[in-house]
Amino acid sequence: MSDEDADVELEARLREQEYFRPPSKFVGQANASDPAIHDEVGEFPEGFEAYAELLDWDEHWDETFDGSNPPFFEWFVGGKLNASYNCVDRHLGERKNQTALLWEGEDGEQENITYQDLYREVNEMAAALRDVGVEEDDVVTIHLPMVPALPVTMLACARIGAPHSVVFAGFSASALAERVDSADSDYVVTIDGYYRRGEFLEHVEKADTALEEADRDPQVLCWTRHDEVHDSADVSDEYTMVPELLEDHRRETVEPVSRDAEDPLFLMYTSGTTGKPKGCQHRTGGYLAYAAATSKHVLDIKPEDTYWCAADIGWITGHSYIVYGPLALGTTSVMYEGTPDYPHKSRMWEIAERYDVDIFHTSPTAVRMFMKWGEEHVEGYDFDFRHMTTVGEPIQPEAWLWYYKHIGDEDAVIVDTWWQTETGGHLITNLPALDDMKPGSAGKPAPGIEPALVDDEGEELEPAAGKAGNLIITRPWPGMLQTVYGNPERFIDTYWADFSDTDSDDWTDWNYKAGDGAVHAQDGYWRILGRLDDVMNVAGHRLGTMELESAVAEVEAVAEAAVAAREHTEKGEVPDVYVVLREGVEQSEEVREDIIEAVEDEIGAFARPANVHFVDDLPKTRSGKIMRRLLENISNDADLGDTTTLRDPSVPERIREQVQGD
């Protein structure tokens, strides 16, 4: 059978049979293979004790859940533990010589860091932090790329009870300064530089500029990418060099600080499209328990696995599913410094083959990128994933199908996952051995999670009615954020006020507002429509950008698509489509008509795009999310606003010039 015939057959299967069964060999070995897990964890709140029991505790909790002061809920009250101990020390007895982190630098450098190595390095860094004055509860801002120094520093902070605030390395100096000030941080950890597409980026310069802009005057600790400061990097004499500091603490050990379950483990700032970033504060006990349990049940991680989450630790996915969850389970994780296409577009599969990766975790954005490059870049590499994950945004059925066939070889289970920085871990996703895969759907609620839909007035929609609404979570879970750092009023206003009775002392009257639109289908599966500002009203029809973009992606010539709402005097809003074509495909009126026809066929004539714009790239954040807000501004001839946090800030202006010339 030719590749073309195979594609046709697989597409036919998708049309006729909306679900895909997990492979029997996967089901037979899965961590979560008993449907009773939903009932057991669903016993609120006691069911979540099974999650906490995955960890080692210094002192057992007295109360599983305290909801007496909503929405400031508490979990595993009275319990004490240390996250660093749970991710490192407790594994030494059984697997001290097992690899914890397989790190690959962009320049080909490799490090095999065992749990014993990790123990030594974390202890030395913890001693170094104490040496410069870091005390328990001091917030340490970490501005590091994907190098081993990043997880080592995080775990060292956790060891001494100092919450960390990791700022994505790609963020600007201004973004770093803003987060340093917001977190009241007196310590910043950076590095001289790192590699990106073959070039050494002088990262320390951002710290220099940030200190000029910040109101605070933090002490700066600087790692080096190599044994010595890179020739091109100019490191201030006022900065404390970490390698020299570590020399003073060789082989030193630091007793893990026993932290209350409710003590903060870290802050994670959301990038935010408007207003100042929000410092989502996560607790030690509930967060770590939830990250570990979802790593085990959703990602099916086992200690003997080689697992690769191809995200950046600078985002919540990297916190939960590179550092804390997998290391708490004692597995081997891959870390990669560079980009997926350097020095060639097969780099990911080369690494997967080299390390014999079992579980692969990436984003729909990356999958669409792989699609755009073509399957020829995957062919010839010998890797065999049993489990694949998507995270960060809804995945279109067409991208799911390509991922299933060309990356999973129609033999791996795929889980889509819906969650947020604020939730700490997966909330809506299938347990892979228990539920059929449904392309384009996030799946069913994770054990113990109770989502619902409400209209704009807060009235609950009938379950499984197939209608779009505002997604809420009706009861707490251990991984949820504690508060917005330093701003409890903003915490209530942002996440609770719209759909809760804020005058009530009864926790059952409080509903977490996700900020996403969703549909609960008749089969019980949940489909996420995207952020509420990514839902448009076309002639009275509430349409998610995902629905429209999925229809556009039906067209073979399309590599990526984004839809923005344009104001219309009669219809309220109409969709404008921005399209990136696959390599080798020329824009034409024929392709334009194919796109319009696909939308009309899939959704209806009322959803017909007003405009189809062919563009070279789409505006994306550094984590890869498409910034539809900017496209909407372009469609409505509005000011673009701040674009400095984009991966390529020049993209929106290029699109604007192109659109005005169309």
Image: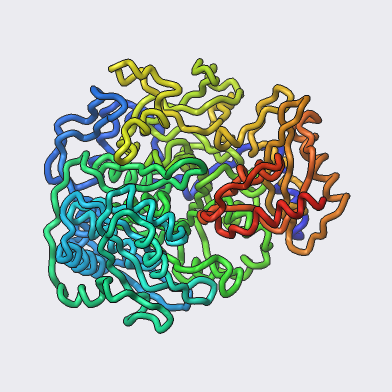
Q: Is residue 427 visible?
A: yes
Q: Is residue 111 left or right of residue 587?
A: left
Number of labelled discs? 0
- Whether residue 14 is visible here, answered yes or no, is no
Residue at (34%, 63%) from the top-left corner? 150
Where is the N terminus found, in terms of image quarters? Answer: bottom right
Q: Position of residue 284 (x, y in %)?
A: 25, 44
For residue 42, side relative to residue 597 (left or right): left
Residue at (88, 50) in percent of width and height: 589
Q: Residue at position x 42%, y 52% from top? A: 315
* Image coordinates for residue 366, horizontal then vertical, percent: 57, 56
Tell me: residue 645, above or below residue 521.
Answer: below
Image quadrant where residue 631 sits: top right
Judge by depth and name the residue closer to the eye, 596 or 436: 596
Relative to 563, is 460 above or below?
above
x%, y% of residue 523? 57, 27
